[in-house]
Image (cartoon, rainbow, N blue to C red):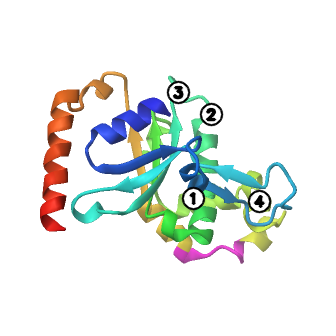
Amino acid sequence: MRRARRWLVSSTRVGECWTRHHRPLGELLEFQWQLVPSGSSAARFSFDLGGTFCGDSLENQSFVAEVKAYKKEGDLPVQFRDFLAKCYVAMQTHPGRCDHFLWLSWAPFQAQRWDEHATADNVKRSVLHAANRKRVFGLEGESEAVSEVKPELLAAVADRLWMVTLCGKQEQLVLTNHHYTEVMKLIASERRAVA
């Protein structure tokens, strides 16, 4: 998480960024599965990072992010399927926290299907998957769950999804500390002038 957070902040397009371990802001990354009994340890889930963007059309827009620092594909397809289900639930329950959903990983996965990952159809497959149906809809059967799917939520999640694949060398292609400080001074100066 630390590496992903550093990379995001170094972009100078992130106004605030926190992890699920930062209190009290970390609580903004916590959500509850729709129909899992509240006493269950599996009732809650959390994203790894959250924050707000700054500048231009992204100004003050929120994001939540999942970070996967894998060296190989491994179980990333399963993790991504679960991430999409989490995004669907988060969007349904707290849309104000979910202007953008970021998937930050160090390994690509299912490259032959890369163009399908951020689609409404893939979000639908993910929420209807046997591993997610019960916790998203509270239903065992796929046919019953299909009737509960909200097409507008599928489209909203797909539209807000960012997929960023990093590598170690790419992490070096950010502003130096000196330049970052100078850019942030300029941004702060511009904000004061507008206010």
Evaluate if marks 4 and 2 touch, with contact meaning CB atoms under 8 Å apart.
no
Let me know if residue 84 appears in the view. no
Name the residue carrying label 4.
135
Decide which of tag 4 and tag 3 comes sooner along the chain.
3
State the SS at label 4.
helix
Image: magenta residue range = 146-152
- Badge 2 amino acid: Asp
> Could you tell me which residue is drawn at 37 percent across and 34 percent down?
6
Viewer-proximal residue among 133 and 42 = 42
What's the amino acid at mark 3?
Answer: Tyr
User: What is the quadrant of residue 22 in the picture?
Assistant: top right
91 magenta-colored: no
Q: How many labels, in total?
A: 4
Question: Is disc 4 in contact with disc 3, using a CB cutoff of under 8 Å?
Answer: no
**For the residues marked 4 and 2, what is the alpha-carbon distance in whole angstroms?**
20 Å
Q: Is mark 3 on a helix, strand or loop?
A: loop
Return the disc, 2 or 3, that comes first in the chain's sequence. 3
Residue 142 position, x and y percent, is: 77, 65
The residue beneath circle 1 is: 87
How many residues crowd around disc 2 within 10 Å: few (fewer than 14), some, or many (20 or more)? Answer: few
Question: 158 above or below 151?
Answer: above
Say which label, 2 or 1, has the lower sequence index: 2
Q: Residue at x 63, y 49 (%)?
A: 46
Circles 2 and 3: CB atoms closer than 8 Å: no
- Residue corresponding to mark 2: 75
Q: Distance between the residues labelled 1 and 3?
A: 21 Å
Q: Name the residue tied to disc 3.
A: 70
Q: Earlier in the sequence, mark 4 or mark 2?
A: 2
